[in-house]
């Protein structure tokens, strides 16, 4: 680096900012993960966006950690985002598949917010 080494206080501040960015990243993605998991439906979440974002964050993480050999606090926010996006992607794909299976079982059922996403129940037989 042609500017010379950073002063210790600058490195300390940069590490704090990396940790703050990681916490902010967790705060950013956790509500969406919780909402998707609780609702057990895809809603209007873009599967393509998450499917592009997760591998993209893993690529940035790889570059920062292994190519440019940055400190942990530099690549930790990308690790956090990549893991959370992967969890969200798995949930979205699972619920999208289930929604499609339900629609195939009964093509006349339109899935709405009130549609229970459970399999058809068998009628009980009175004994």
Image (tube, rainbow, N blue to C red):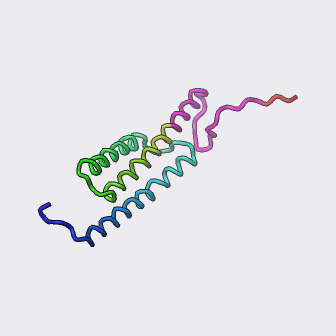
Q: Quadrant of residue 99?
A: top right
Point 60% across, 32% down: residue: 109
Relative side of 107 to 13, left or right: right
Residue 8, horizontal then vertical, whole percent: 25, 71
Q: Nearer the viewer, residue 4 or 63?
A: 4
First to last magenta residue range: 94-123
Q: Outermost residue toward the right?
A: 127
Q: Quadrant of residue 108?
A: top right
Q: Is residue 67 above or below residue 107?
A: below
Q: Is residue 26 magenta?
A: no
Point 29% across, 66% down: residue: 14
Dominant secondary structure, magenta: loop
Residue 31, horizontal then vertical, whole percent: 50, 55
Q: Nearer the viewer, residue 85 or 19?
A: 19
Relative side of 68 to 78, left or right: left
* Quadrant of the snapshot with the C terminus: top right
């Amino acid at each position: 680096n042609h500017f010379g080494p950073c002063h210790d206080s600058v490195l300390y501040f940069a590490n704090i900012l990396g940790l703050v960015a990681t916490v902010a990243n967790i705060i950013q993605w956790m509500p969406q993960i919780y909402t998707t998991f609780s609702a057990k439906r895809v809603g209007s979440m873009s599967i393509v966006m998450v499917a592009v974002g997760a591998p993209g964050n893993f690529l940035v993480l790889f570059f920062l950690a292994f190519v440019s050999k940055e400190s942990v606090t530099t690549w930790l926010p990308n690790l956090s985002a990549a893991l959370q996006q992967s969890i969200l992607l798995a949930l979205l794909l699972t619920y999208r598949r289930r929604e499609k299976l339900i629609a195939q079982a009964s093509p006349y059922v339109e899935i709405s917010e009130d549609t229970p996403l459970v399999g058809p129940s068998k009628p009980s037989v009175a004994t």
